[in-house]
Image: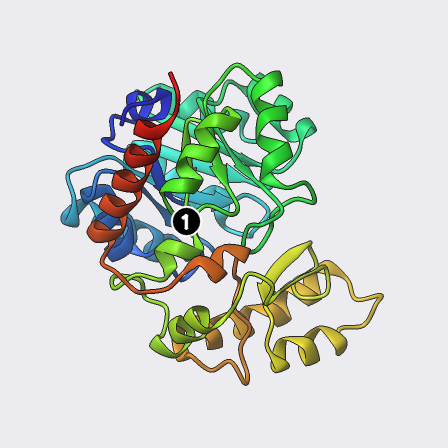
Amino acid sequence: MHTKITKLFNIEYPILLPGMSLISVPKLVAAVSNAGGLGILASGTMSQKEALDAIREVKSLTDKPFGFGASLMIPGAKENVALALEEEVPVINFSLGKGDWIVEKTHTYGGKVIATVVNERHALAANRYGVDALLVTGHEAAAHGGDVTSLVLIPRLADIVDIPIVAAGGFGDGRGLMAALALGADAIAMGTRFASTQESPVHGNTKQAILDRSISDTIYTTKFDGMPCRIMETRHAIEYIQQTPDDADMFSTALRAGPAIMSAIVDGDLDKGVQLIGQVQGLVEDLPTVEELVQRVITQAQAIRSTLPN
C-alpha cells in the first residue's frame, strides 16, 4: 500500500508509531520500522547522553528509516534535536515550538521533518517553515490532542496545506487507515494501539487495564499536566485531577504529572499512576506482536478497499 508518506519516508506501509514518552523506546521503534512502518523515538525529558544512546540503539536494531521526536517546550529538547541532527536521523518530528531551524538543518543531509499540529494556525505555520509532512492530532488521541475530532480536522487541514498528512487520534486498525485516507490523510499514527503490543514497554498491569476499558473510559482535562490532555479514567485519575487547584500554573502541574505517568507505564500501578490513553483503547482486544498488528491493519484495509465501488 503506497501513498505520499510511504514514498516520502521510503517505508513499505503508511503506518507510524508516534513518539510517546517512556513508550516509544528503541525496541518498539525498531520493531515498527522493521515491520514496514516508521517508528519515532520519543526523547521526552531524556538527557543528552540518554538521547544519543537511544538513537544509536535504534540504529543497532534496524537498518530501516526511523524518526526522532521532541517537544520543543521541554528543557533540553533543542539540545537533543541537535544531537539527532548530528546523527543524521532520517526523520525529525517536533511539536510545541517553532521548528524552522530544524527544517533547514535536517534538509542539509537529506532528512525529512514532521511537525505535530492540532489546529489550522499551527498547520499553516509549519507549512510555511517548509516541513515535509504534518502529524495531525485529533481530539480522540491520547495525551495532547486538540479540541476538534479527526473526522473534521483532517479534511480541513488537507484543504489548506500542500504537504502530506499523517492522521493521529482514533486510529487502530485497517478501518481507521482506510477512513484516514478517505479524509485526505496519507498515513496513520497509532499510539495507543502500538502501546498495546508485545514489544511495548508498558507494564503488563496497564496493558490489561487497556484491554478492560471501553471507548468511553477516558478523561479529557487541563488539570492533569496543565494542557488539554486525555488520560485513562480510573478512580485514582479522578481523584488526581480533583486535587489539582483551578489556579495551578502549567509548570508545577506538569512536574507533578511526571511521576504519575511513570508509575502507570513503568510500575503498572494505577492506584498511584495515571495513564495517557486514546479513545481507541476500546477497540483494543489483544496484545499482538508489532509485525502481526501491522499485517493485520494492512490486510483489513486492503479487504475494505476491494469491496468499495470503482
The scheme the figure's colours follow is rainbow
Residue 166 horizontal side relative to residue 27, left or right: right
- Label 1 is placed on what type of residue? Gly
Estimate the x, y position of residue 229 in percent, counting from the top left: 64, 57
Estimate the x, y position of residue 28 in percent, counting from the top left: 28, 55
Residue at image x 55%, y 57%? 279
Estimate the x, y position of residue 206 in percent, counting from the top left: 42, 74
Q: Which residue occupies the extreme right position in the image?
A: 247
Q: Nearer the viewer, residue 230 or 49?
A: 230
Q: Quadrant of residue 197?
A: bottom left
- Disc 1 target residue: 172
Estimate the x, y position of residue 281 in percent, counting from the top left: 47, 61
For label 1, the SS is loop
Residue at image x 32%, y 57%? 25
Indicate the quadrant containing the N terminus: top left, top right, bottom left or bottom right. top left
Q: Quadrant of residue 300?
A: top left
Residue 239 horizontal side relative to residue 141, left or right: right
Residue 179 horizontal side relative to residue 223, left or right: left
Q: Nearer the viewer, residue 39 or 301?
A: 301
Q: Is residue 144 above or below residue 37?
A: below
Q: Nearer the viewer, residue 65 or 157?
A: 157
Q: Is residue 277 above or below residue 90?
A: below
Q: Nearer the viewer, residue 190 or 178?
A: 178
Number of numbered callouts drawn? 1
Indicate the quadrant containing the C terminus: top left, top right, bottom left or bottom right. top left
Residue at image x 69%, y 80%? 239
Residue 272 horizontal side relative to residue 42, left or right: right
Within 10 Å of the Cα at label 1, are there few (<14), some (14-19), or many (20+) other Cα atoms? many
| Residue 85 visible in the picture | yes
Residue at image x 44%, y 22%? 132
| Residue 89 visible in the picture | no
